[in-house]
Image: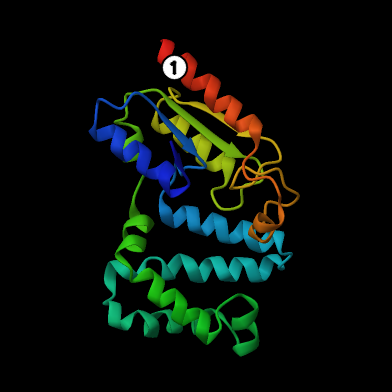
Amino acid sequence: IGHSEGGLIAPIVASRNSSVAFIIMLAGPGIDGKETLLLQNRKIYEIGNMPDSLINKRITILNEVFDLPKTTDDNNLLTEIDKIVKKYTTGKEERSAIGFSPKSVMVLANTIKLNWMKTFLYLDPCEYLSKTTCPILALNGSKDCQVLPQENIDAIKKCTNNRAETMILPNLNHLFQNCETGGANEYMMIEETFAPTVLDIMHNWILNTIKK
């Protein structure tokens, strides 16, 4: 059972180990990391009521930035990101408005040079899901703004030829808490750690799967 990135790792393990009896993907991605992050950014800024024109500009910039590690030396990432940001923005005020202040650009450059991030950006979960033969349960919350539910559940279904059992659970966020908006700013404010209904779904599915 893996959550989020763990939900990506679960099918990697299962595709390589036939002794795995089942996997449960909790908000696990079915699409590659780059697309996951682009969708995530769009949703988060929509929740924050950023104007569509600025959201589109941010996504355009990130789309190019996330391709840089393929062609750019780590030492040149900061310079190349800055060039992309300047190409699409009109000045410091707009840069800051869409999350590309000089400090944010430095953080972004340091993040995408990490080996973990390079792997995540270009890893396609379908490569492993298609080779996973054990039973699969994939659960997502309908208000998940980090691993968007419909896009990822649809991809998981396609990659497994509809063999995976999937559910999009109403009113739950990325952490499977009952929530208002699904925004990350709510996580620490919600008393509930993990919705009991999800535990029941997992419990019943595991018992039924083991019996089979």
- Quadrant of the image for the C terminus? top left
Residue 188 lies left or right of residue 125; in this view the side is right
Q: Nearer the viewer, residue 61 or 129?
A: 129
Residue 86 lies left or right of residue 79; in this view the side is right
**Residue 27 on image: x %, y %:** 52, 42
- Quadrant of the image for the N terminus? top left
Q: What is the crowding at mark 1: few (fewer than 14 residues within 10 Å), some, or many (at least 20)?
A: some
Residue 7 sits above or below residue 65 on the image: above
Question: Could you tell me which residue is drawn at 52 percent across and 36 percent down?
Answer: 153
Quarter of the image for residue 171 reads top right
Question: Could you tell me which residue is drawn at 63 percent across and 56 percent down?
Answer: 43
Residue 67 sits above or below residue 202 on the image: below
**Residue 186 on image: x %, y %:** 69, 57
Residue carrying label 1 = 209
**Residue 192 on image: x %, y %:** 68, 45
Question: Could you tell me which residue is drawn at 61 percent across and 52 percent down?
Answer: 145
Residue 68 lies left or right of residue 182; in this view the side is left
Q: Is residue 91 visible?
A: no
Q: Label 1 sits on what residue type?
A: Thr
Question: Could you tell me which residue is drawn at 45 percent across and 82 percent down?
Answer: 106
> In what element is the residue under mark 1?
helix
Q: Is residue 185 visible?
A: yes
Residue 51 lies left or right of residue 12; in this view the side is right
